[in-house]
Amino acid sequence: MADYRVQLRDMSFLLYEVFQAEKMWAQSPMLAEQIDVQTADAILQECAKIGEQVIAPIAREGDEVGVSWHNGEVSTAPGYKDAWSTYAEGGWVGLGGDPDFGGMGMPKMLTALQEEIVCGADMSFSLYPGLTAGAALSLAKHGSEQLKQQYLPNMYSGEWAGSMCLTEAHSGTDLGMIRTKAVANTNGSYNVSGGKIFITGGEQDLSDNIIHLVLAKLPDAPAGSAGISLFLVPKYKVNTDGSLGDKNGVSCGSIEHKMGIHASATCVMNFDEAEGYLVGELNKGLACMFTMMNFERIGVGIQGLSCGVRSYQNALEYAQDRIQGRSLTGTKSPKLAADSIMVHGDVRRMLLTMKALNEGNRALALYISKQLDLSTYAEGEAQQKGTKLTALMTPLAKAFFTDIGLECAIAGQQVLGGHGYIREWGQEQLVRDARITQIYEGTNGVQAMDLIGRKLAANKGEYMKIFAEEINEFIAANQTAEMAEFITPLTQAAADFEKLTITILTAAVKNPDELGSAACDYLHVFGYTALAYMWAKMAKASLVKAPDDDFYQAKLLTARFYFARILPRRLSLSASASSGAEHLFNINDQLF
Amino acid sequence: MADYRVQLRDMSFLLYEVFQAEKMWAQSPMLAEQIDVQTADAILQECAKIGEQVIAPIAREGDEVGVSWHNGEVSTAPGYKDAWSTYAEGGWVGLGGDPDFGGMGMPKMLTALQEEIVCGADMSFSLYPGLTAGAALSLAKHGSEQLKQQYLPNMYSGEWAGSMCLTEAHSGTDLGMIRTKAVANTNGSYNVSGGKIFITGGEQDLSDNIIHLVLAKLPDAPAGSAGISLFLVPKYKVNTDGSLGDKNGVSCGSIEHKMGIHASATCVMNFDEAEGYLVGELNKGLACMFTMMNFERIGVGIQGLSCGVRSYQNALEYAQDRIQGRSLTGTKSPKLAADSIMVHGDVRRMLLTMKALNEGNRALALYISKQLDLSTYAEGEAQQKGTKLTALMTPLAKAFFTDIGLECAIAGQQVLGGHGYIREWGQEQLVRDARITQIYEGTNGVQAMDLIGRKLAANKGEYMKIFAEEINEFIAANQTAEMAEFITPLTQAAADFEKLTITILTAAVKNPDELGSAACDYLHVFGYTALAYMWAKMAKASLVKAPDDDFYQAKLLTARFYFARILPRRLSLSASASSGAEHLFNINDQLF
């Protein structure tokens, strides 16, 4: 496996040359205090060092050895404790955390890149701090002042970690059916009882305490999701002086044996009259949890990106070294027994597909992160626009980046041939790891329904119109001869996408099943159209400098590749998405 | 995991109602002796029983325990020896073998279905008899009478097994670079020395002897692939009386640890002055090996089909049982806490995509098998047509069926959600197993190059024209109102595909790299167009009977689904395939 090399140059290009992050930072009084270009660059460089040198080296053994369970205790894989300590001591768990409670207050544009780096180094490892940061975010937003003071500083410092306890054996996508119960105690706390499955980091030996955010229902709660409340349930109770007290009624019954992310502990958790504390309002727990879920959904999307980036690096190194066969246009390396496989069009197709998709997705991840930062730090219209676009694009990030992540992991494996299938090269691990990203945090089908239902149909396309207007403004502002090769296909793609949106929304008025039938294909048309916008923006930022600089030259050529070979995917997807729900529903269940 | 249920009804539909296999059998004097409908049905039913009851039950433990290596010996997983014995004793290894040497002489249309059944039961297991049958085929076609008498009967009976030794560490796709040497002995045998990797079944404890077909070069052989010869190298030498003699200079240095097919022994094989016997002519070994490779390539394609079929069955059973959420058009199961996930359009999309692709691919597998049977058993024009179409479609079968196999395995896993990712449900094994089918026997990129180079450009599209003419004849013969919904899109797809073929062949005259650049997408357009033809044929065979019979009704509805939602994939692929090689080659290697 190729050594991990964080793509810092591309990150900097996106931050400053494409998205002008520094301007947004300077405009927000809160951000201006925390961050400028120099700080951001120093953070990314330091993070890259930890990713490349501390975390990446434990990934292979982590996959081979995995986590183990014995009598309710989970042992993480070799090297994980040390890596966690180094990571936590560097303040990395709290990089995006609330500064009032010891976090570093960094914007999402930076923590998104941190996530890419850490996950690119080792996806299993990244989940422990990722869940902790997400739980802390929900707590910071919805927790009482007392809970925040008691828990956040130790979570940001990595002394304690977090988990997210939603799924039960019979209830995953449909959380309204959960059976975990919470009964009020006289002292304001609750006794939480029930079983949860698929709990990432539910038990581990990295941190002194584990702070579970648990969905449960009061005995008299309304039926369905309107009766869900959110509770903070610590593994060890916390004394008023902040020291650890008794073990709470929380135990890990077993861990799952999975296809991948072997070094991530996926736990069956049992809550047995465990003491818990309400977060947010009673019966409003799902909304509080969604703060964490939306954070994690973008994070999972970025995991897909990381798998793609790592796969590209592996495949490129292999392709450059491996000689096999001869170029169709005549021998290129006469002194060697064969040419490098870089001479073969199909190998270049696979590599450039990965490159174009990864760089496009990284741009889109930062675009979405910028919207999230605007929703947090801006005011007025910019803030509102940021909030709406974040809502619109969170399911896109989760599903599109992870679908592409698997595609890239598979393409990378294909470049390696048989060597990609044996464990020793490490590429097959990326395929196994990438695969979970399409499933957890709501399957990609659920994301597609969230997009087309809640984020599109529910507001009659208002959020999507905001995005379309932004693209149209960009198109109008770039009617130049140099940009025409990008603007012309972008204009067509954006117009076709708008038509598709109207077609589906119109059809859904008569038959709501049109939404579910179109959802997945529609999400992907959205993704490829959004990437066309990203590639046009990147091309614009590269045009002037390209003649003298390989980096910009590569950007321009990759942009051309994207428009020629990837964007046409929208054609098939649009045809499929608009073909009508009857082809799915005319066939009775017994005829399957 | 759902119990494996062999789709015998569909197999019979294809054999007799779509492809009129019984007519071909009756017309060939050789086949008429061996097979009729009754025999074929009895064979398939018996094979299904063994697949479902003997082989399928060992697959999960085979994956968990895998094969192990100790001091050069390989132990197969629990149950494999017994299953092998039962399978061999039933005569199944020699089902397609030469009757003059103890084989059962069954045509490919039947052995293709046998392959689907055995591989659907357990892909790892299927490789042992699969490689044996392939090696026997090459031997039957190219071996001397003496070699055939000495080896074939014991291979057909499964007392001995076979392997295929091509790849070396530095030489896989490009076999011209192999270093394994063969030196002539005075007694007509050769001493073979060298190392081979990725040898499936190179060592195992199932059979008394292993017959390796080994590619090697004589010291004075011409350079490159023109200097390759094929040798039969047994693990144990065979005495003139047929009994086993001394151990030959063959050893297994280690086995690979792989992503999947854990119960298949993938061996590093060392040949140390091992006694070998020439098969075919000196320096013509690659052609002899291609007899086996073409057999295995169709076989690997069918492995992809099997993974898809199994995944569909798993996903369907899960989807029917699992309740989660409510239908978009109102509650369907008011007495349950939620509706079955069958109510969700996106779940139906995944299931029907799998169903349409699997049934289409099974039809195409039988279509290609019929061509192969015609090339073997027919005469004159029918024989020639069969030979050409088999050559044309062998890379299609290998690459298209396996790419779709992985797609279906992943879709199946996605339907199962988190339960598809944990090992206990067995679905993730299918994903890991399916993944190798796209890689071994020549990666799918190599298949795409074989198709567009050797099978298309090299004969200036002659083979493809034969296929196009057949489709056009079918279109002309079915200009009816009932068939219009299938004939109209098929006509368009076939015409567009012809245009694409001409575009690429024309461009390739100026720039041969156009072939490599278009190869993979072109192969997939071919596949979807061919499936459109298959679905139109299946629709035709179903139209009259559909009103009164669920089976035919389901066929018609699935055909409609295929044309509405799958066939449009050709649009994107065609656009990408014809976008020009410059997008892949204008970017210098250092800019990747």
Image (tube, coloured by chain):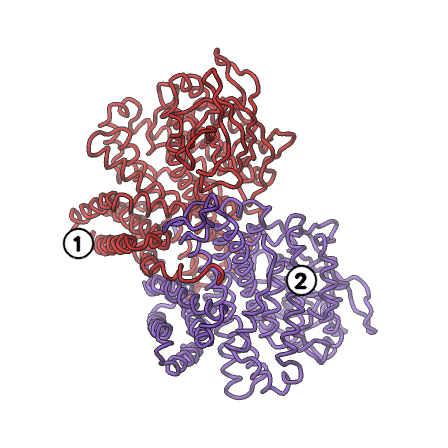
Chain colours: A red, B purple
**Numbered disc 1: what chain?**
A
Residue A520 at x, y percent in the picture? 37, 52
Q: Is residue A405 left or right of residue A546?
A: right
- In this orientation, does residue B203 appear? yes
Q: A257 or A325: which is nearer to us?
A: A257
Return the residue at label 1: A481
| Residue count near mark 2 (Cα–Cα under 10 Å), binned few <14, some 14–19, many ≥20 | many
Residue B57 at x, y percent in the picture? 67, 55
Of circles 1 and 2, the one toward us is 2
Q: Is residue B32 above or below residue B177?
A: below
Residue A463 at x, y percent in the picture? 25, 43
Q: Is residue A356 left or right of residue B164?
A: left
**Numbered disc 2: what chain?**
B
Q: B100 or B56: which is nearer to us?
A: B56
For residue B369, the mark is: none
Q: Name the amino acid type tagged 2.
A: Tyr
Looking at the image, which residue is at 38% across and 25% down?
A: A280
Q: Is residue B17 above or below residue B346?
A: below
Element type at mark 1: loop
Return the residue at label 2: B128
Q: B16 or B83: which is nearer to us?
A: B16
Rounded to the nearest whole Å, what is the CA distance between mark 1 and mark 2?
62 Å
Q: Is residue A583 above or below residue B589?
A: below
Q: Name the amino acid type tagged 1.
A: Ala
Which residue is at the far top?
A241
Residue B119 at x, y percent in the picture? 61, 62
Q: B192 or A102: which is nearer to us?
A: A102
Q: Is residue A38 left or right of residue B410?
A: left
